[in-house]
Amino acid sequence: MKRRVRGCRRAAGLLVIALLSMTATTEAQIAQVVESPYAAPPDQALVVFSRPRRRQASDVTYRVVSHAGRCLAVLENGWQMGVTMWPGRHMVMVVTGTAPPTIQLMELRLSAGKTYVVNLRSRVHVKSPVRIRIVRRADQPLEAFPPAVVKLAPVDPDLRRCTEWVSWKRSKIETRAEQVKGKWDEAGDEYRAALTVRRNDGWTAAEVPAP
């Protein structure tokens, strides 16, 4: 009887060892999934603000600021930055210059789990120094995520300094923002639509490639 118990225990021990070794082998064979830095969290949206590099150096800083005065992104020449935001509607300002600062508005209508792309390019000798172009999914070949975004390395600047700067310039920014918001409300639907990110303009996490 004791021999049978010992035999059963030995067999059980060998079975456990075999299972552990199979598990280790299986885990080693499974390729690790690398998450793309351009994939949005499931409960939030990701907005990529991209400023392509120009041959001529520019010292003008682009600051993307929320209606509450918090800096969302800072863009120098050739910079790109991703910002996680809650789904819903947001009105944001693109602030350039200092004396006085120039304010341009855009509206974001975001869905959770999607990545949106906004290109910002400089313009000269115009009242609106930044050309805001929303990269819409439906306008891309095969609706693929734009490869130019993946090629441009993201940056992670200190947004606290930017927010402090906005607070310092608050009176001037608020005055200009009120004027621009009045023009936004009076503008036609076509003008506002060109500067509005729509919910269907984004890509899901599965559609966003890794760099």
Image (cartoon, rainbow, N blue to C red):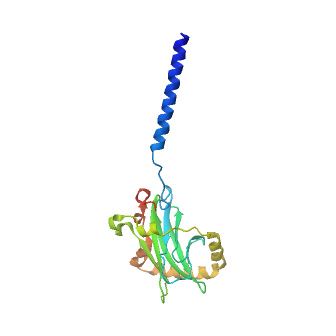
Is residue 211 positioned above or below 75 on the image?
A: above
Q: Position of residue 135 (x, y in %)?
A: 41, 70
- For the point 62% across and 82% down, the residue is 172
The residue nearer to you, when weighing 92 against 137, is 137
- For the point 48% across and 30% down, the residue is 18
Is residue 2 positioned above or below 195 on the image?
A: above
The residue nearer to you, when weighing 90 against 154, is 154
Q: Total marks drawn?
A: 0
The residue nearer to you, when weighing 96 against 69, is 96
Say which quarter of the image contains residue 157. Answer: bottom right
- For the point 60% across and 84% down, the residue is 98
Q: Position of residue 100 (x, y in %)?
A: 59, 86
Is residue 177 positioned above or below 70 on the image?
A: below
Using the rendered image of the protein, determine whether residue 87 is visible from the camera's viewpoint: no
Q: Residue farthest to the bottom?
A: 125
Q: Position of residue 140 (x, y in %)?
A: 35, 68
